[in-house]
Structure formats: structure tokens, C-alpha cells
Image (spheres, rainbow, N blue to C red):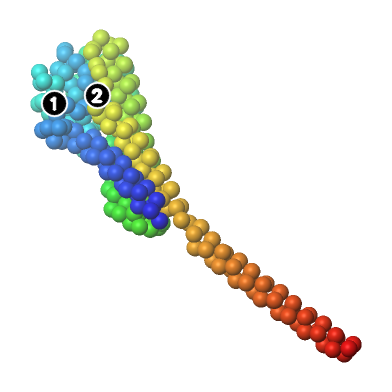
Amino acid sequence: MVARPILGSIALFLLAGGLLLHWFLVLSGGLNSTPENPFSFLQASTSGISNARNPSRWTFWAICGADNSGNNANCGSPVPALPFDPPRNFGTQEKVPESFLGTHKFYYLSRFMFAFYLVSFLFAHMALLTALLALFSRLGGYLSALTTFVALFFQALAAALMTSWVVIGRNNFRAAGFEANIGKYLMGFAWATFACYFLSSVLFCIGGTVGRDTPSGGLQRKRSTRSTRSARSRGSFLETDMESQRRVKDNYSS
């Protein structure tokens, strides 16, 4: 049916768009060039804290500073599953806001966020490969819907965890007298990716259901036509037989 390729194409476009934003997110801090330079989760003015850049920016892979153009600069070495934990990040508790001391909440929120983003990233690529089948078959549509939904699920978890530690971290820095701001680009990318994956999974699923009843419906129509024709044939035969009997009776009576 024509509807299936159209729905599959729209879903594929949304999936590819979400995956592009996902790439921007997971490359932040690991690739210090355009267009990745402005991207960070959280920026805080950390003047007075030893071993800290001023300001300090937390990205996906590293803690960076900022130049006069607002781009990432002087980034540290890439660290897998980089935690947001100022005492651990700076190697000191001196002048670090007290709300970050004696707790592992931010450490686990950011570490699990990293893992969930990568799982979502993997399944989004798998969905992109199976999406080509969704243009032509119901099975491809259902398979793409399943893989995209898994990517959506882990993307939702990662974005929720990220939003939690970023917002609470900003508030804690501000409460301690530091200037802090949320990275609007990565925050927007995270939830825009979630929206793209959600719409894509819905469209893939709808594409899989298109034309589902066509074969059985056609078979039922054929059976109905055959039974109607058969009934007409039997009716014609009975009428002919009754007419013949009347003629015989008329001949005998005459």
C-alpha cells in the first residue's frame, strides 16, 4: 500500500534527525571543534575552588573551561562515564558547596545517565538499519518500532537523570553564591531526541498495521461471492425442476 512507504519515510526522517542530535550530545567534550564547541550540560563559576577551571563546564566526556566566545576550552582528558561530583572532580572539598559534600546522589545520577545514553544510542542505530525494511513490509515496520521504542525508553531514562542532576546542581551552586547556568543546547537536544524517537516509533507501528486485514478481507469477499453465485445456481435449478414437474402434471391431466 502507498501509505506504508509514506509513513515509513516520515518515521525514518524523524529517527535520523533524533540520531543526529544524539550524536551531538555524546560527542560533547570528546570533540573540541565546530559544531561541538558550545555544548555542555552545566556551567558554573568555580572561582576560589582549587584545581577548578573558572568557569567549569561539564560535558559528556570531560570538564572544560570556556573562552571569550562562549566555546569550550582547556578541556581535560576524556573520561568514560564522567561523574558530576564536584569534590571528586576538583580533588578537594574546600569552598565546594556543602550540598555536594557527603552524598553520592549526583555521582550515580550522572554515571547511569552516561550508560543509558549509550544504550539508547546503540538501539537507535539498529532501528535505522531496520527502518529500510519498514518501507516495504509490515514485519519491518514492527521490528523498527520495537528497536526505536527500546531506544526511546533508555533515552527517556537518560534525559530524566540528566535533567535531575543538572537542575539540582545549578540550584546548589547558586545557593552557595556561585553563578551557574544550564547548557541549553544539550538540554534541548536530549528532549528533542526523545520526541523524535517517540514519534518515529509510533509511525513505524502504524505503518506495520496498514493493510493488515486486506488478505483476509479479500478472501471473505471471494467466499461471499462464491456462496452467492452457488445460491443463485441452486435457486435456478430448483425453479427449472419445479417447472418441469408442472408440465408433466399438465400433460397427464389433459
Give the residue displayed 30% in from the left and 11% down from the top: 175
User: Callout 1: 10 Å neighbours few (<14), some, many (20+)?
Assistant: many
**Residue 250 percent location from the top left of the image:** 85, 85
Secondary element under disc 2, as helix, strand or loop, is loop
Q: Residue at x 25, y 9 (%)?
A: 177
* Residue at screen point 27% across, 32% down: 189
The residue nearer to you, when weighing 214 against 18, is 214
Label 1: which secondary element: strand
When the figure is inspected, residue 229 is found, relative to residue 37, above or below; the finding is below
Instruction: Please say whether residue 145 is visible from this viewpoint.
Output: no
* Amino acid on which disc 1 is placed: Asn
> Mark 2 or mark 1, which has the lower sequence index?
1
- In the rendered image, which residue does mark 1 sit on? 72
Answer with left or right where residue 118 lies relative to residue 160: left
Q: Residue furthest front?
A: 254
Report the amino acid beneath label 2: Gly
Residue 228 x/y as whole percent: 64, 69
How far across and down, in percent of the image, does residue 108 sit? Answer: 32, 32
Q: How many marks?
A: 2
- The C terminus sits in image quarter: bottom right
Up the image or down, 106 lies above or below 10; here it is: above
Residue 163 visible (yes or no): yes
The quarter in which the N terminus is drawn is bottom left
Residue 172 lies, in percent from the top left, at 30, 16
Local crowd size for mark 2, using a 10 Å CA cut-off: few (<14), some (14–19), many (≥20)? some
Q: Toward the viewer: 195 or 88?
A: 195
